[in-house]
Image (spheres, helix red, strand yellow):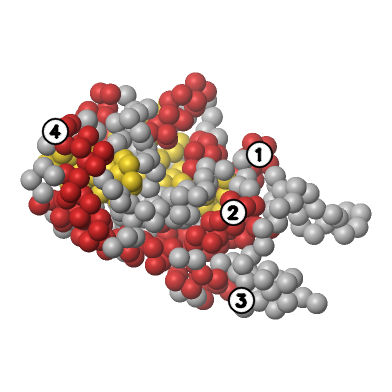
Amino acid sequence: MRAECYYDDYDKKENLHFDSKVVHGALGCDPMTGALSFPIFQAATFKHREFDVSTGYLYSRLQNPTRQELERTMAILEEGYEAFAVSSGQAANMCVFGMLVDGDHVILSDDLYGGTYRIAEDIFRNLGIDFEYVDMSDMENLENAWKPNTRMVFLETPTNPMMRVSDMRKIAEFTHKNGGIFVVDNTFLTPYFQKPLTLGADIVVHSATKYISGHNDVIAGIIVIKDDTFSDHFHMQLKSRGNGLAPMDSWLLLRGLKTLSLRMERHNSNAKEVAEWLRKHPKVKKVYYAGFEDHKGYAISKSQSTGFGGMISFELDSHETLVNLMNNVKMILFAESLGGTETLVTYPLTQTHESIPADIREKLGINDRFVRISIGIEDVRDIIADLEQALG
């Protein structure tokens, strides 16, 4: 007997508000058994019903029911056409850059995650792709960098780690007018605060390891496309590269998504308080946080996002102060990554941005006094108290 699930047809989820969508997912529960926790289909292959008639599933490298539930859920949340769950955020970017061919020119944020820079420079530049890095918070820089062979614009907003904000509507309009593809890394804000596809982006990518998971227990990436233009490309990437997300990891993301709205609200409110506190500390020389009203991109953020997220960067008065901070935090954890329930403090110079050449890091302001902090969902009083005692 087939169990009836609430909103069994996942297309009907568009009638729900976001906070309900993250809880109920695409199918939400298992249509066959009614299990409220969507099952982990730990299967490599699937039995055919009869000759030339399948269940829709053939082999888990191609598609798996657990991964499909995650992908459909992410497409709903980002308001896109289709989503693809892959083995890491790096794998997601590999799939995106896999669209490029010899002779293509790509414009990227000059301030971006070091792993993205490494993929561009150490892998795809060797395949004849030309990469150029510009500050796209100023549209004039993008316009000046455009070439006849520009194929793609790849944007982080806010950027990692300098928290620059770019106008996605203007970038999308300019990119499409000139025949390019507009890709946005939405890791920092997630679809809870920002939906780039609704602002003109063609493709959204996530390091789902971060806020989508939210619990520092899985490595994963997500790609969401606006329409079917690139659908065949990404299906081929998963089929041929074999980088589709495993069933257990897909299930962990589904579980994490159920609390995304609650977590993002807490990350956001905590970060605002911590950023204001840091700004007043005598050993903190500068704070980079998109939620300050005097931030250059504040008005743009308000026009395209509904929150500022949980990420802050700041520069200390000396390297000695930085070392003391890293060594003396107690509740806060000195660890690479972001977006989990715990507050993490990171040293970009040797962790997240070690692949960026020294001259570029120095130009951006990523020096030996520079700290990035991912604000968790703990009591904000405890986060501030730990920073206070560690800074001395």
**SS assignment at label 4:** loop
Q: Are marks 3 and 2 in contact (CB under 8 Å)?
A: no
**Residue under the image location 55 percent in, 35 percent down:** 98
**Residue under the image location 38 percent in, 40 percent down:** 336
Q: Amino acid at mark 4?
A: Ser
- Of the two numbered discs 4 and 1 on the same chain, state the one appearing first in sequence: 1
Count of residue discs = 4
Query: How far, Cα to Cα, is label 3 from label 1?
Result: 32 Å
Q: The C terminus appears in which quarter of the rendering?
A: top left
Residue 250, label in figure: 2
**SS assignment at label 3:** loop
Residue 265 placement: quadrant: bottom left
Mark 2, other Cα within 10 Å: few <14 / some 14–19 / many ≥20: many
Q: On the picture, is 314 further left or further right than 309? A: left
Q: Are marks 3 and 1 in contact (CB under 8 Å)?
A: no
Residue 251 visible:
yes
**Residue under the image location 44 percent in, 71 percent down:** 19
Residue 72 placement: quadrant: bottom right
Q: Position of residue 309 (x, y in %)?
A: 31, 56
Residue 195 placement: quadrant: bottom left
The residue to which callout 1 is attached is 242
Q: The N terminus appears in which quarter of the rendering?
A: bottom right
The residue to which callout 3 is attached is 7
- Of the two numbered discs 3 and 2 on the same chain, state the one appearing first in sequence: 3
Q: Position of residue 155 (x, y in %)?
A: 37, 43
Q: Amino acid at mark 3?
A: Tyr
Q: On the picture, is 330 further left or further right than 20? A: left
Query: How far, Cα to Cα, is label 4 from label 3?
Result: 56 Å
Residue 318, label in figure: 4
List the single residue furthest toward the right.
51
Q: On the picture, is 356 further left or further right than 43? A: left
List the single residue furthest toward the left.
282
